[in-house]
Every structure is written in structure tokens, then in C-alpha cells.
Amino acid sequence: MKAVTRDPVKRREYNKTYYARNKARFDAQNKVYRESHRAEALAHLAEWREAHPDYMKNYRKEHPEIIRAQQERYLAKHRSELNLRRKETAEKLRVEFLIAYGEPKSGHICGVCPCCGEDLLRFGTLHHINGDGREHRKEKCHHAMLREAIEHPDKSRFAALCFNCNLAAERNGGQCPGHGLSGR
Ligand SMILES: [Zn+2]
Ligand SMILES: [Zn+2]
């Protein structure tokens, strides 16, 4: 067996060739380590980033294309999960809106359509009483509209109508021709 030299230069050379010869094994070991210590590594990275806010800010500014590619990879990888979460958020907001605006009636969690009496839980929608729905939709997404109606209640502007009455009202300049908005 070859004796390992004490000469630091030769020693470094030896280590380098040893590493190069066994690269595949080291890579595999490192991979196993990284995977089994993933949470720790991520926590460490988050800590480091928090301690170096300027570094991250500059990095983002200097490499927008890398950041964008990362975001796209993340979106692609988590698309179905993100879509599901978005759907859940939308449904939660819709129900919250309907509870606040629907016409109360016992046995109906979200109340009923003030126009036709249809249960709102299944088909309730946000109606713009003054016909400004188109402009409002241009201004913000559906989530944001619902959030606005919930956080800044305005029953002179928003109403909860069933899908049919809402559609009919929109096509008829604000009034559902079949029923007429009762008292609103
Ligand atoms: Zn209706
Ligand atoms: Zn109606």
C-alpha cells in the first residue's frame, strides 16, 4: 500500500485525484445527505437569506431571467396544487360574500336570491347593481372584487343573485326581466 505523503502540496494533489476518481460515489453520498437533511438545509438557507437581504435584492435585480425561470419551474411543478388552492380560496370568498349579502332565510346557509328565491349556496354570484360590473372586472380579478365587497360592505352597489338572475340582469341593463330586484 502506498504511504500517504505528509507534504501538503502532494497531499492536496492526492486528495484532488482521489476525489476525481470517486466523484460518482461522493455525488451519490451527497445526494442522499441532502435529501435526508432537506428541511435543515432549507431552514439554513432561509436564515442566511434573511441575514443578507441586500444580497438577495441585488441578485434578483441582476438576474431577472434566472428568477423568472425559477418561478416558472415552481409553477409548473406545483400547478395542480396551486390551482386547487386558488379554487378553495375562491369558494371560501364566494360563500363569505353570499352570507353577507344573501337574503336571509332559515335553512339556507348563504340565504336565497332576492329576485327568485333560489338557494344561493350552489349558484350564488356577485351582482353589480349599477351595471358597472364590466369596468370593475377590468380593474381587478374576481377574488379581489369579492374581497372588496366583503371588506367594504356596500349594498347599494353589490348584491348576491343566483347565476340565472345575474346573467339575465346583466343582459337587461341591470334588472332581471323575469323578477325585478325586490326592494334593492
Ligand atoms: Zn335568482
Ligand atoms: Zn330574477
Image (cartoon, grey):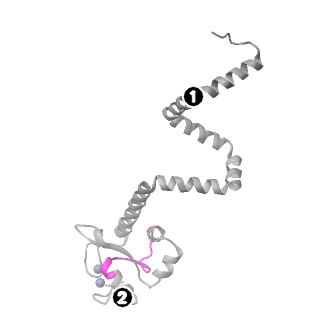
Q: Which quadrant, please, contains the N terminus?
A: top right
Q: For this view, does 8 lie left or right of residue 28?
A: right
Badge count: 2
> Which residue is drawn at the image coordinates 39% and 68% (left, top)?
97
Q: Residue under circle 2?
A: 175
Give the quadrant of ligand 2. Answer: bottom left
As drawn, which residue projects farthest toward the left?
Answer: 107
- Asked if residue 152 can be seen in this view, the reply is no
Q: Residues within 10 Å of mark 2 (few under 14, many from 20)?
A: many
> Which residue is drawn at the image coordinates 33% and 87% (left, top)?
176
Q: Residue 111: image x %, image y %? A: 29, 71
Q: Is 32 in front, or is 46?
A: 32
Distance in Å between CA atoms under marks 2 and 1? 72 Å
Identify the amino acid type marked 1.
Phe
Position of 158 relative to 150 (above/below): below
Q: Secondary structure at mark 2?
A: loop
- Asked if residue 64 can be seen in this view, the reply is yes
User: In terms of image quadrants, where is residue 5?
Assistant: top right
Q: Residue under circle 1?
A: 26
Q: Residue 25: image x %, image y %? A: 55, 28
Q: Earlier in the sequence, mark 2 or mark 1?
A: 1
